[in-house]
Image (cartoon, grey):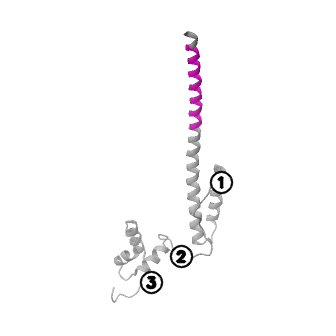
Amino acid sequence: MGNMPKRYYWTRAEEAKLLELFKAGVTEPKDLAEKFEGRTSGAIQKKLERLGVLVVVQKKPQKSKTTTTVVEAKGLLTHEESLKILTGALALLRKSGQDKLELQRLRILVDAVQTYDSVLEKFERWVEIENELGAMANEIAEIKKELQKAKGIVS
């Protein structure tokens, strides 16, 4: 890199090349820096963070935790309850002035609610199928009893 002057701006072509390389699997900033003359791995990492490709790792420990290690369910949410959560998250996403961490949290919440609702729908279908199978098993048992009675009368 020798005598190359430091450049502080990125051209759109450089940004496009950086994203293309990252999507192609070159994800380490030091490896990417080798492909960009005059760019350090730190500069590459900051650019990836600004482009929203890398999540910024907080260096200071937070005073309060934002995640839990164990999540205990207190019952299933209904479709209506999950829709209310989704609606609230989407409303917050539309508001300007959200910081990056809050936007990430809301996007995760939206994805989680959509996944939950899909799984809930499948679960409800399985419960319906189980109920139908149970009813069919009862009908078969009744038919067997009637057949045994009929055989007893004929014998």
3D distance between C-alphas at marks 3 and 1: 52 Å
Amino acid type, label 1: Lys
- Residue wearing tag 3: 8
Q: Quadrant of residue 137?
A: top right
User: Circles 2 and 3: CB distance less than 8 Å?
Assistant: no
| First along the sequence among labels 3 and 1 | 3
- Dot label at residue 58: 2
Query: Which image quadrant: the C terminus?
Result: top right
Residue at the far left: name it: 2
| First along the sequence among labels 2 and 3 | 3
Instruction: Indicate the position of residue 152 as horizontal and vertical percent values.
Output: 57, 13
**Mark 1, other Cα within 10 Å: few <14 / some 14–19 / many ≥20:** few
- Residue wearing tag 1: 74
Residue placed at 33% from the left, 88% from the top? 2
3D distance between C-alphas at marks 2 and 3: 24 Å
Residue placed at 58% from the left, 41% from the top? 127
Residue placed at 41% from the left, 69% from the top? 19
Instruction: Indicate the position of residue 115 as horizontal and vertical percent values.
Output: 55, 54
Q: In the picture shown, does residue 8 fall above or below 124?
A: below
| First along the sequence among labels 2 and 1 | 2
Residue at the far bottom: name it: 3
Q: Which residues are magenta?
A: 130-151
- The residue closer to the viewer here, 141 or 85, is 141
| Horizontal relation, residue 108 to residue 75: left or right | left
